Image: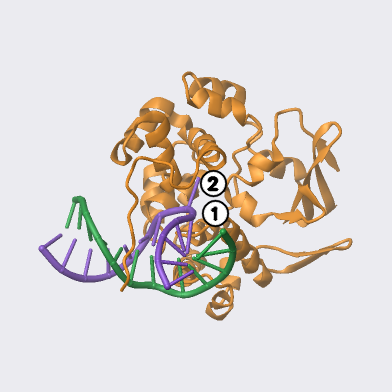
Chain colours: A orange, B purple, C green
Amino acid sequence: MLISLSTPFDIKATFESGQPIGFLWEKIRSNPDMWWYPHDKGLVQVFESHHGIGIAGIGQVKDLGRFVMETFRLSDNTAHLYREIGRDEPMKKMVQNDVGLRLCKVGLWEALACMIVSQNNNIPRIRKNVQDLKKFGEPLQVGSIQTNYFPRPEELTKKALTQCSLGYRCDYLWGTAKALAAGDMKGIEKMSTPDAKELLLQLPGVGPKVADCVLLFGLGRLDVFPTDVWIERAMQKYFHVKPDRIQAFAQKRWGKWRGYAQQHLYYWALTHMKRGESDMGKKKKKRK
DNA sequence: TTCCAGGTCCTAG
DNA sequence: CTAGGACATGGA
């Protein structure tokens, strides 16, 4: 089964813009423009073809269409929403520069695991940590491809986690896995965004930033604006907004689509800004 | 050797 | 309630 997309889809921007999907999916070494992930009893592949973007189900993949629609949010009217959030500069140029950047949805647990691991960590290592976690999921063989499903919370053990070099995040992830296995997040999908956030904040290792990311990438809520160091720097540089004003500003300017605005701003910062670029003083660490 | 990385937690004031 | 440091790990 093969799906051909007509909407803009930039593989690199989508998978390498710091979203959980880019940490969870695997990239083929010989072809950096091909990515895959286990689904149902087979694999879903995304790749570049002569006609544009192709998405294929390899092996037994029952509901490929629905999975693809949900994961890549293909029913979002991006043309309309980009017009809305891109009314003025500089967001206009940021959105137009990355029109093919898809905001992707993964499972709640997968989003939690990725974002807990991401704190005070760098993107290449986050990816490595998340891929290491897959060693503890069920194996899957499709043709010559050998991979694993991402492990369910109840499949993890404390001992297994300590083998993933997660550092101090290990205890956070273990605590969160136990909470999910115990059903602590039950019903969160149907809750309002503020209520869902309050519930997420109960989990160990989940603060405001991780909670917002989980709301955005794991629950598909667009009415959040996750703010990390990059967003702070970019908001200061491009919008002259100080950290304590970011939330109010984003809500007023980009409204219910601010999750999309955030992702484009983040990717812009990632690809256009240097590390220390900002007029805000950075906090320094001291020796013990 | 020192600094940094899509932050959170804990403590002191 | 707010500010500041600790927290593991590995790459530059």
Residue A230, percent across and down? 45, 44
Left or right, A241 with reference to A88: left
Residue that carries the numbered disc 2 in the rendered image:
A217
Left or right, A135 with reference to A191: right
Q: Is residue A223 above or below residue A135?
A: above
Chain for disc number 1: A
Tell me the number on the disc at residue A111: 1
Q: Residue at x 48, y 71 (%)?
A: A167
Chain for disc number 2: A
Left or right, A254 with reference to A80: left
Residue A10, percent across and down? 69, 36
Callout 2 secondary element: helix
- Judging depth in this view, the residue of A281 and A39 nearest the camera is A281
Residue A2, percent across and down? 84, 40
Confirm or deny contact between disc 1 and disc 2 (CB under 8 A).
Answer: yes
Q: Quadrant of the N terminus of chain A?
A: top right
Please tell me how crowded label 1 is: few (under 14), some (14-19), or many (20+) other residues with Cα within 10 Å. Answer: many
